[in-house]
Image (cartoon, rainbow, N blue to C red):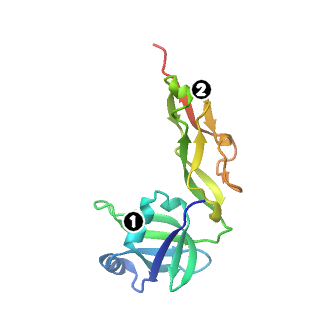
Amino acid sequence: MSQNIVFNVTVRERTGKGGAREARRNGFVPGVLYGGGEDPVAINLQKNEVVKAINTGQFLSSTATLIHEGERQLVIPQGIQMHPVTDQPEHVDLYRIKKDQTQTVEVNVNFLNEDTCPGLRKGGTLNVVRYAIELNVRADSIPDQLDADLAGLEIGDALRISDITLPDGAQPTITDRDFTIASIVGRAAA
């Protein structure tokens, strides 16, 4: 399961451009909390916590917990805006969820056994079609990554979604076919 990121937040009284600039000056990242049948709430997140969460590489595909005055709220990040020059977070959109709620997330594919793959050892090349797969999965079962095993694949073989073990209750958003994730291709004959 994906690691749970924790943010200590405060409610932002001042909204709009001026309130967001004030939050950034004070070391916060402004954000908005949506969903769950409640009104949107303007919040401030600690900048160091946001940067740490982004650096995990799983920020947009994992759940997070907001803590405000001792109360906890499970959320999933919906978007982040970065400064075009400094590459620092400028704004975060978060969406309220429940643990048993199904979410659509994009999960990275991790390729295993590249060094022992017979097709690659014979001079073939790994042709990756999908580096990430979009899944419908419960919020409490979001995987960190999907492992794709290349052991035993020869030149001309393909790795499909049916070859990957998905978490219980998870299914790809593409359900009408057994789509290709990667294949082993050889060099063209001279």
Q: How many marks?
A: 2
Going by the image, does 89 lie left or right of 147? left
Q: Which residue is mark 1?
A: 51
- Residue at point 54% right, 73% down? 65
Disc 1 is placed on an element classified as helix
Amino acid of disc 2: Glu
Res. 35 image quadrant:
bottom right
Pointer 1 with pointer 2, Cβ within 8 A: no
Going by the image, does 109 lie left or right of 90? right
Task: Tell me if mark 1 has few (under 14), some (14-19) or many (20+) residues whose alpha carbon lies within 10 angstroms of its own.
Answer: some
Does label 1 or label 2 sit earlier along the sequence? 1
- Residue at point 36% right, 81% down? 19
Q: Nearer the viewer, residue 66 or 78?
A: 66
Amino acid of disc 1: Val
Q: Is residue 106 above or below residue 71?
A: above
Res. 181 image quadrant:
top right
